[in-house]
Image (spheres, grey):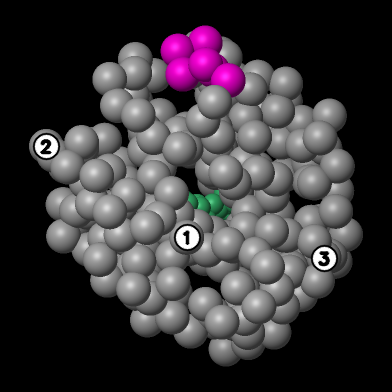
C-alpha cells in the first residue's frame, strides 16, 4: 500500500533528474510519481518506460516505490513495459480504456499494485465496480502541472471514500501543496502527489516535509 507524499518528477529539472530524485528521497519521500502522457489521451507527450528505468535503482535502493500514472489511451498495452522498467504501482484511467478490468488484471499479473484514476468530470461511482489497491482522484484536469486545485474535489473525495471503504489508498493529484493536502486528508485521501509545490519551491526539502506533516493532519 502506498501512502504519504509522492513527488511528481514532471516538475523536476530533467537535466539533473537523479539529483532531484535523490533530494526528495533524502527529504523522506517514500513514493516517486511518474506522469506518462501520450499526446492522445491528453495533449502533451511526456515520458515513457525509459524514464522509469533511469530512476528505478536509485529509488529502490532508498527503499521507496515508483508510482506510474498512465495518462494514455489503451494503457493495458503498455503495462508490461512499465512493470519491466521498475514500476511498483501502475494507475490507469477509467476514461482511457473499454477494458478496465483487463487492464487492472494485467497490472496485477505483472506484479504491481493496481490503481484506477478518474478525471474531475467522472463520477466517483464509476470506480465502485472494480477492485484496485488505489483510487486516484484527479484534483485538476490531467495533462499539465501547475494548475489550481479544483474545489469540487473535496466533496467528491468524501463520496469516494464512502464508496470504496477503508481499504484502498486514495490518491490526490493536481494543485496539491500543504494547505490542499491537509483538506484532502480530512476528506479521506492518503497519497498526495505534488509536482510544482515540491520541485518549484525555493526549498524542496522543506516543501516535502510541510506536505508530509499537513497530510498527517
Ligand atoms: C497532471 C499530473 C500531475 C502533475 C501534478 O496531469 O497527473 O501528477 O504532475 O502537478 P502539480 O503538483 O504541479 O499540480
Ligand atoms: Zn499524475
Residue depth check, mark 2 versus mark 1: number of the one nearer the observer: 1
Which residue bears the numbered disc 1?
A: 88
Q: Where's the N terminus, which quadrant? A: top right
Name the quadrant containing residue 101: top left
Q: Distance of mark 2 from mark 1, alpha carbons?
A: 24 Å
Question: Which numbered disc, 2 or 1, marks the residue that appears first in the sequence?
Answer: 1
Q: State the image coordinates of residue 51 (x, y, percent, origin top left).
A: 43, 78
The residue lying at 77 percent from left, 37 percent from top is 215
Q: Earlier in the sequence, mark 3 or mark 2?
A: 3
Q: Confirm whether the magenta stretch covers residue 173.
A: no
Badge 3 marks a residue whose secondary structure is loop
Tell me where residue 203 sits by quadrant: bottom right
Return the x and y of residue 4 as percentages of the image width and height: 70, 45
Marks 3 and 1, how far apart at CA: 20 Å
Question: For the magenta stretch, what is the residue range?
Answer: 161-166
Residue 98 - label: 2
- Is 71 on the left or on the right of 216, as rendered? left
The quarter of the picture where residue 190 lies is top right
* Direction bottom: furthest residue: 15
Q: Nearer the viewer, residue 72 or 63?
A: 63
Q: Position of residue 193 (x, y in %)?
A: 60, 49
What residue is rendered at 52% in x and 16% in y?
165
Q: Position of residue 136 (x, y in %)?
A: 46, 37
Amino acid at each position: 500500500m502506498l501512502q504519504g507524499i509522492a513527488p511528481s518528477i514532471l516538475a523536476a529539472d530533467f537535466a539533473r533528474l537523479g539529483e532531484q530524485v535523490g533530494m526528495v528521497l533524502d527529504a523522506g519521500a517514500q513514493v516517486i510519481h511518474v506522469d506518462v502522457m501520450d499526446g492522445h489521451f491528453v495533449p502533451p507527450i511526456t515520458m515513457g518506460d525509459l524514464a522509469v528505468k533511469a530512476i528505478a535503482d536509485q529509488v529502490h535502493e532508498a527503499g521507496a516505490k515508483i508510482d506510474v500514472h498512465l495518462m494514455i489511451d489503451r494503457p493495458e498495452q503498455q503495462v508490461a513495459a512499465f512493470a519491466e522498467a521498475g514500476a511498483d504501482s501502475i494507475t490507469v484511467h477509467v476514461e482511457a480504456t473499454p477494458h478496465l478490468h483487463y487492464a487492472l488484471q494485467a497490472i496485477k499479473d505483472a506484479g504491481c499494485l493496481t490503481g484506477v484514476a478518474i478525471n474531475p468530470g467522472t463520477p466517483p461511482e464509476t470506480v465502485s465496480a472494480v477492485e484496485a489497491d488505489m483510487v486516484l482522484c484527479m484534483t485538476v484536469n490531467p495533462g499539465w502541472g501547475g494548475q489550481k486545485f479544483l474545489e469540487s474535489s473535496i466533496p467528491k473525495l468524501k463520496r469516494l471514500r464512502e464508496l470504496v471503504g477503508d481499504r484502498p489508498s486514495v490518491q490526490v493529484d493536481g494543485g496539491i501543496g500543504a494547505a490542499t493536502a491537509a483538506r484532502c486528508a480530512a476528506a479521506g485521501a492518503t497519497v498526495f502527489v505534488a509536482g510544482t509545490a515540491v520541485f518549484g519551491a525555493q526549498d524542496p526539502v522543506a516543501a516535502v516535509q510541510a506536505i508530509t506533516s499537513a497530510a498527517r493532519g
